[in-house]
Amino acid sequence: MYYRRSPFNCRLMLKQPYNQGINTQQIPPKKLLMHTSTHEGATGFTLAYTFQAPQEQVFGAFGNAEALNAWWGPAETQNSVICLDFRPGGIFHFRMVSAGGVHYGRFLFTRIEPHYLLEFNNAFADEDANVVPPPFDLPFPLEVHYKLVFSEYNGATTITLTGTPVDADPEATAGFHAIRDSMEQGFGGTFGKLAHYLQQQ
């Protein structure tokens, strides 16, 4: 069975990072990751990134706790997995450490179709994985829904990512669009780490 629970206890917070992850100073060569397109719609945005790795391997990096410890999160943060229950209705709860302090995040998986489709609601969270407001002074949705479609061509895999606010009022939606460039930069750094991780496998 593809879906599996991680060895992490979802009810306990890890006091130390499980894994230090990859060296974020080692910037992957551009050929390992290509940002192929950007599109902004009325409610959300779409980004596409291409990796020099098979589709099954790229998708698998989202469903493995050890892999996520190595690559998930912007380049300037050190993230660690607290809980991964990779199935529809399951969660990915993680800790983020940066110069700005310690924060927590959460995915709630809504749809998983190996090795083609992954959908989840992403939010900031507390130590117990409860959704909390973002830690910045800007109206912003409590949750953002992400849809990732994986496709392979000639051994390279493209992830087409769409982000859409969940149940957000107009002010929060405007805040979402106001920092779209920052979110795109964050995904670029995160997927750069994923490209480096895939190269090492």
Image (tube, rainbow, N blue to C red):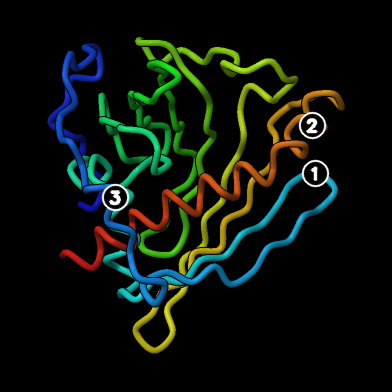
Name the residue: 30% across, 68% down: 56
Q: Which residue is the site of mark 2?
A: 173
Mark 3 lies on a secondary structure that is loop
Badge 1 or badge 3: first in the primary sequence: 3
Q: Return the residue nearer the eye: 52 or 163.
A: 52
Q: Return the residue nearer the eye: 56 or 190.
A: 190
> Where does the image place residue 157, in percent across and percent down from the top left?
41, 74
Q: Is residue 149 left or right of residue 87?
A: right
Q: Is residue 35 above or below residue 136?
A: below
User: Which one is closest to the eye, mark 2 or mark 3?
Assistant: 3
Do the residues bearing badges 2 and 3 touch, measured as CB atoms within 8 Å? no
Question: Please, which residue is most extreme toward the bottom here?
Answer: 154
Name the residue: 42% across, 49% down: 190
Q: Pick the quarter of the image with the C terminus.
A: bottom left
Mark-to-mark CA distance, 2 and 3: 34 Å
Amino acid found under the numbered disc labelled 2? Thr
> Where does the image place residue 187, in percent across and percent down from the top left?
51, 49
Q: Which residue is the site of mark 3?
A: 25
Q: Is residue 12 left or right of residue 114?
A: left
Mark 2 lies on a secondary structure that is helix
Amino acid found under the numbered disc labelled 3? Gln
Q: Is residue 93 left or right of residue 138?
A: left
Name the residue: 30% across, 32% down: 78
Q: Is residue 146 above or below residue 168?
A: below
Mark-to-mark CA distance, 1 and 2: 7 Å
Amino acid found under the numbered disc labelled 1? Thr
Density class for disc 3 (Cα within 10 Å; few <14, some 14-19, many ≥20) is few
Mark-to-mark CA distance, 1 and 3: 35 Å
Do the residues bearing badges 1 and 2 touch, measured as CB atoms within 8 Å? yes
Name the residue: 56% across, 16% down: 135
Badge 2 or badge 3: first in the primary sequence: 3
Point out which mark residue 43 bears: 1
